[in-house]
Image (tube, grey):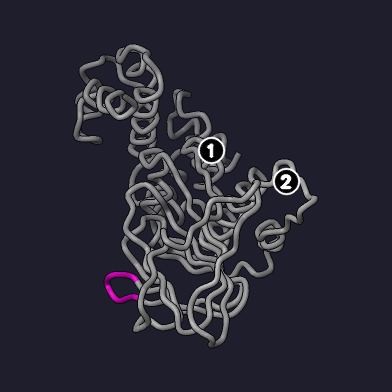
Amino acid sequence: MDALSEVLRLARFAADVTLDATAGAPWCVSVPASSTLARGYLVLEGECRLRLPEGQELRLGTGNLAFLPTTPAHLVGSDFDAQAVPIASLQRAPLAGEFVPVRLGGHGPATRWLAIAATFERHLADPLLASLPPVIAVDVASASPVAALTAAVGLNLTASDAPAAGAAARRERLAELVIIEALRRHIQSMPAGGKGWLAGLNDRYVGRALALVHGRPGEPWTVEKLGRQVGLSRSALAERFGLAMGEPIIAFLTRWRLQLAAETLLTTSRPVAAIAREAGYESASAFAHAFRRAFRKSPSAWRKRARRRTA
């Protein structure tokens, strides 16, 4: 499995359409900041603009998708001088499994757009999210999931219809595929010579090494062993990885193991000593020191915080 797919799988990436809107100019929708949701906006017909708090603006046309991996407060609309409508006031619960479209704005040129919300386990999605800019805009008009998602939303029930079996689950999977396609196209469009996790994915050898590290983190990897797996010498892979990622392979592997250990602490009752050994540490104290440095909490405090939230 490739590194992007592995990170999305482990981070429990999920997405769904939260709004199917047709807006006539002038119109404006306000979206609050969120520490838990990533946001996407897919324009099906017409055009609109997106404005971030720093004043950055993007113009989106038909087939364009804007994705905000972290969500500051922002505006979406045709005219930012129009009265902003909170997005929460537009969202409707599905009716018998079917999505309810909404209308807003004036009588000017219309734009049909979908709002998509995505969730991740943030500490596991960090390699991806930390490498992305505040917003990406990608043309996904030709992507097959977009056509399928367009057909999947909307109110299609008649008085004699039964809800389509699996409609909601299908819509969720399609929304996820649209976001993944946008991420894939963004990665492919990146210029050569960049640094970071996304740049590493674009490198033939570094991308393979990342896939191995993400897919089999518990294996006793060495740079030499990874080099044999990807087809490079130890020194060549070390140099290539450092240039693309901006850090040594073992430093990256150590951080990824700590992120997986953080998830194990949240989701299991396994002893800290066992988790420490799995993360490659000879003692629980060495693991605790490294964990505190990475997450600003001890392993036991991290686990207790999760239990308090669940309660």
Residue sitting nearer the eye, 239 or 69? 69
Residue sitting nearer the eye, 118 or 77? 77
Disc 2 target residue: 163
Decide whether the magenta segment is chiefly helix, strand or loop. loop
Q: CA distance from mark 2 to mark 1?
A: 29 Å
Whether residue 209 is visible: no
Whether residue 147 is visible: yes
Query: Within 10 Å of the Cα at label 1, are there few (<14), some (14-19), or many (20+) other Cα atoms?
Result: some
Dot 2 and dot 1 residues touching (CB under 8 Å): no
Residue sitting nearer the eye, 30 or 137? 30
Q: Is residue 229 left or right of residue 51?
A: right
Helix, strand or loop under label 1: helix
At horizontal 53% and vertical 57% (from top left) the residue drawn is 183
Can you name the residue that lies furthest to the bottom here? 108
- Amino acid type, mark 1: Arg
Task: From the image, state whether disc 2 or disc 1 is nearer to you.
Answer: 2
x, y percentage for residue 275? 36, 18
The segment highlighted magenta reads 52-56
The mark found on residue 9 in the picture is 1
At horizontal 20% and vertical 17% (from top left) the residue drawn is 285
In the rendered image, the quadrant that contains the N terminus is top right
